[in-house]
Amino acid sequence: MCGFLTCFVLKWLYTKVTTFYGKGLKKEHLTPSSNPQIFKSSNSKFVSLFLEWAMVHRPFFAPVLPLRPDEETAFELDLSKDGPHAANVDVRNPQQFEDYLNVLLNRTGTSMAIGGYLEHRNLYADKQLFNAGDNQSERFIHLGVDVWMPAGTEIFAPLAGKVHSFADNDSVGNYGPTIILKHEPIADLVFYTLYGHLSRSDLNLLSVGKRFEKGECLAHFGKPEENGFWSPHLHFQIILNMGNYFGDYPGVASLETIAFEKSNCPDPNIILNCPLI
């Protein structure tokens, strides 16, 4: 009975607040997939429950970053294969890309670059981790939001959660140090947030089950030599069903998996609250 009432109240609140707090979220990013796989590991009703709950609580999430990303503090960085930056810089070269970003930050008068959800990127093609050798299996569709800021930048928990798992995924092109938080905000709702490309020291005092309160410092942006050999940035991702993953979850999908992954990994901007993306 309580579960029914919770769903009813959330649905009612969702209709009231979506108009006001939907800015920055694209309609196609909020639509649960019709792919039959979704019923095997992320029930469509559960996906809808998460989206309804998250839209209601969107104004109350703590900032993940020291600054809220908006028109004054951030600019949208499109790294898709046909985007405006693809031909201008090699993202796989950390120093070259950091220099390029600094020029853009100075030109725009902003402090961070942000973007990436569902972008079709070509910057993984040279990495065996993402390339299975055929177009359907090759992973190039980005499932998180990337935020580019200096190494050492603090990262905060947007809501209370416990450490589900963590790992140093230290191969080139991978996440590097990674933390995954488990959130259980209401009955019948469990989801996870993933933080990738962190500082290695952030893992030193962690333990599975350690609790972080809303707004508590969780980690820091890592340097290229420890974060998977990328220019410093945070990969932030929402995951509804972790399956058997521990300390890791795919941050890039293939054509054959994107229908499922789009539903299992909703738009992270529902928590980040950036009006630009």
Image (cartoon, rainbow, N blue to C red):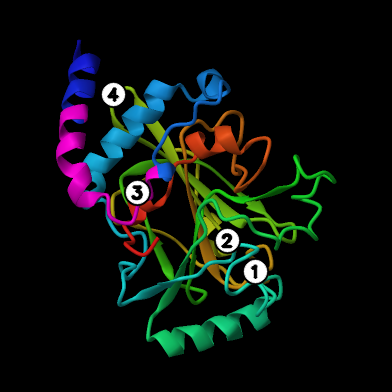
Mark 4 touches mark 3? (CB < 8 Å): no
Q: Which residue is mark 1?
A: 230
Is residue 35 visible in the rendered structure shown here? yes
Question: Does the stretch in magenta take in 134?
Answer: no
**In whole angstroms, how far apart are the C-alphas of marks 4 and 1?**
38 Å
Instruction: Look at label 1 and name its amino acid.
Output: Trp
For label 1, count other residues whose C-alpha is less than 10 Å away and answer few (under 14), some (14-19) or many (20+). Answer: many
Name the main secondary structure of what is drawn in magenta: helix
Question: Which element type, helix, strand or loop, lies under badge 2?
Answer: loop
Q: In the image, which is nearer the foreground, mark 2 or mark 3?
A: 3
Is residue 204 visible in the rendered structure shown here? no
Q: Which residue is mark 2?
A: 197
The image quadrant where one finds the C terminus is: bottom left
**In whole angstroms, how far apart are the C-alphas of marks 4 and 2?**
31 Å
Q: Which residue is mark 4?
A: 187
- The disc placed on residue 270 is 3
For label 3, count other residues whose C-alpha is less than 10 Å away and answer few (under 14), some (14-19) or many (20+). Answer: many
Mark 1 touches mark 2? (CB < 8 Å): yes
Is residue 243 positioned above or below 105 on the image? above
Q: Which tag, 2 or 3, sits closer to the chain's start?
A: 2
**Residue at horizontal 74%, vertical 61%?**
172
Quarter occupied by residue 232: bottom right
Q: Which tag, 4 or 2, sits closer to the chain's start?
A: 4
Question: Which element type, helix, strand or loop, lies under badge 3?
Answer: helix
